[in-house]
Amino acid sequence: MPYVNIKITREGVTAEKKAELIQGVTKLLQDTLGKNPQTTVVVIDEVDTDNWGIGGETVTVRRKQGL
């Protein structure tokens, strides 16, 4: 039973896009590894940009700097 955890920044991703991601990852595991889609678990965690850091700065700060 595959378990996939996707972490993204919370920046307005629609429910439709998340459903597309879940379907796509499930299909990828089925096509690539032969995994049963009925037992594949996909979890999407959304993290506030203030709680996600890259290079010693939050994503919020980096976005303001245009990075």
Image (cartoon, grey):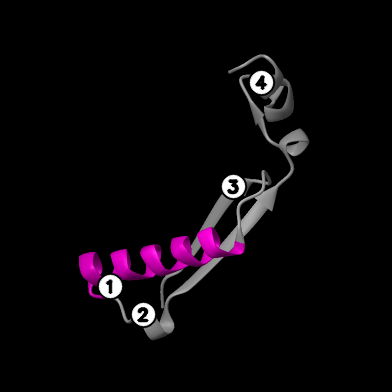
Q: Nearer the viewer, mark 4 or mark 1?
A: 4
Whole-percent x and y of residue 23?
41, 69
Where residue 8 is drawn, which disc sits there? 3
Towards the viewer: 10 or 16: 16
- Judging by the rendered image, the residue that carries numbered circle 1 is 30
Dot 4: within a 10 Å radius of its alpha carbon, few (fewer than 14), some, or many (20 or more) residues?
A: some
- Judging by the rendered image, the residue that carries numbered circle 2 is 37
- Judging by the rendered image, the residue that carries numbered circle 4 is 62
**Could you tell which of marks 4 and 2 lies nearer the N-terminus?**
2
- Residue type of the residue flagged with mark 3: Ile
Whole-percent x and y of residue 43?
56, 65
Check the picture and name the quadrant holding the C terminus.
Answer: top right
Element marked by disc 2: helix
Q: CA distance from mark 2 to mark 3?
A: 22 Å
| Magenta stretch in the rendered image | 15-34
Residue 28 inside the magenta-drawn segment: yes
